[in-house]
Image: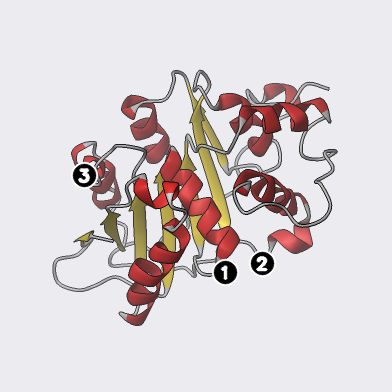
């Protein structure tokens, strides 16, 4: 995989790395063009950014997780990065999630913006069962090509406080009119408060830019020139909301 490093500080390398995975048919340099890198710098965050040319061919041949780990994660750990976050848009969000599924514990956090989360028919099945809290995952081994059926049981671990402590921090952002929003809402209902961000609109850069800036304001990232928090520090709690106040709430 070809990568492009954008340093937070020209004088030294940071201890934290944000790895950006583009959506289908998008180019990695679009993250820079659309203000994702400048948003990091404007907040004076001590986090370098790595743009990864992970095109859809890696998803078609099911080598995304293997190549991302061998070509990106492991080499960057060897360079001294202590905290690595995956930031993915659309199918890039899916890639970040399935990478953690296949390589648990290899990254410290994931930001999934408008992620593809699998087939709508599976989402409809989960919704019919009352959401992730009540859905029963199928027992027994699953075909390798049904990655989404493996992903949703993994999401259910975020519902269990003890299990979720061993999982990477997961932040979700999506437009309420996004074509994948029905599945986004199912995942949102299972995540802790303060980890879900929504905006009006659909599946495009204006929504992704706004979501990234909102998420970036609360990510537990170190600041330039200040003492650096640990990667596992939780962000400040968001104001508590009743289920009816959540735009993604699952209807009873």
Mark nearest the camera among 2 and 1 is 1
Q: Is residue 158 left or right of residue 34?
A: right
Neighbour class for label 2 at 10 Å: few (<14), some, many (≥20)? few
* Residue at the spot of label 2: 166
Name which residue lies at 65% across and 42% down: 193
Name which residue lies at 27% across and 52% down: 53
Return the disc, 2 or 1, that comes first in the chain's sequence: 1
* Residue at the spot of label 1: 105
Neighbour class for label 1 at 10 Å: few (<14), some, many (≥20)? few
| Residue closest to the eye, 220 or 87 | 87
| Residue closest to the eye, 23 or 228 | 23
**Which circle marks residue 32 in the picture?**
3
Name which residue lies at 32% across and 57% down: 45
Q: Are marks 3 and 2 in contact (CB under 8 Å)?
A: no
Where 20 falls versus 250 (above or below)? below
**Which circle marks residue 218 in the picture?**
none
Q: Are marks 3 and 1 in contact (CB under 8 Å)?
A: no
Q: Are marks 2 and 1 in contact (CB under 8 Å)?
A: yes
Name which residue lies at 36% across and 58% down: 18
Disc 2 is placed on an element classified as loop
Disc 3 is placed on an element classified as helix
Disc 1 is placed on an element classified as loop
**Residue 50 occupies which quadrant of the picture?**
bottom left
Query: How many callouts does the rendering have?
Result: 3
């Amino acid at each position: 995989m070809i990568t492009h490093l954008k340093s937070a500080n020209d004088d030294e390398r940071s201890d934290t790395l944000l790895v950006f995975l583009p959506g289908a048919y998008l180019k990695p340099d679009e993250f820079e063009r659309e203000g994702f890198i400048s948003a990091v710098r404007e907040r004076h965050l001590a986090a370098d950014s790595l743009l990864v040319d992970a095109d859809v061919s890696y998803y078609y041949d099911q080598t995304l997780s293997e190549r991302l780990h061998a070509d990106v994660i492991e080499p960057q750990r060897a360079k001294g990065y202590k905290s690595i976050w995956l930031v993915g848009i659309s199918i890039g969000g899916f890639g970040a999630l399935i990478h953690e599924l296949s390589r648990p514990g290899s990254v410290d956090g994931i930001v999934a913006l408008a992620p593809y989360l699998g087939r709508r028919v599976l989402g409809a099945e989960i919704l019919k069962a009352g959401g992730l809290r009540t859905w029963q995952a199928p027992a027994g081994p699953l075909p390798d090509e049904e990655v989404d059926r493996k992903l949703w049981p993994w999401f259910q671990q975020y519902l269990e406080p003890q299990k979720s402590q061993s999982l990477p921090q997961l932040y979700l952002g999506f437009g309420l009119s996004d074509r994948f929003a029905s599945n986004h809402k199912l995942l949102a209902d299972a995540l802790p408060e303060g980890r879900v961000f929504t905006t009006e609109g659909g599946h495009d850069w204006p929504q992704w830019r706004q979501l990234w800036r909102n998420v970036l304001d609360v990510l537990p990232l170190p600041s330039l020139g200040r003492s650096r928090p640990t990667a596992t520090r939780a962000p400040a709690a968001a104001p508590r909301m009743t289920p009816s106040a959540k735009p993604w709430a699952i209807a009873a």
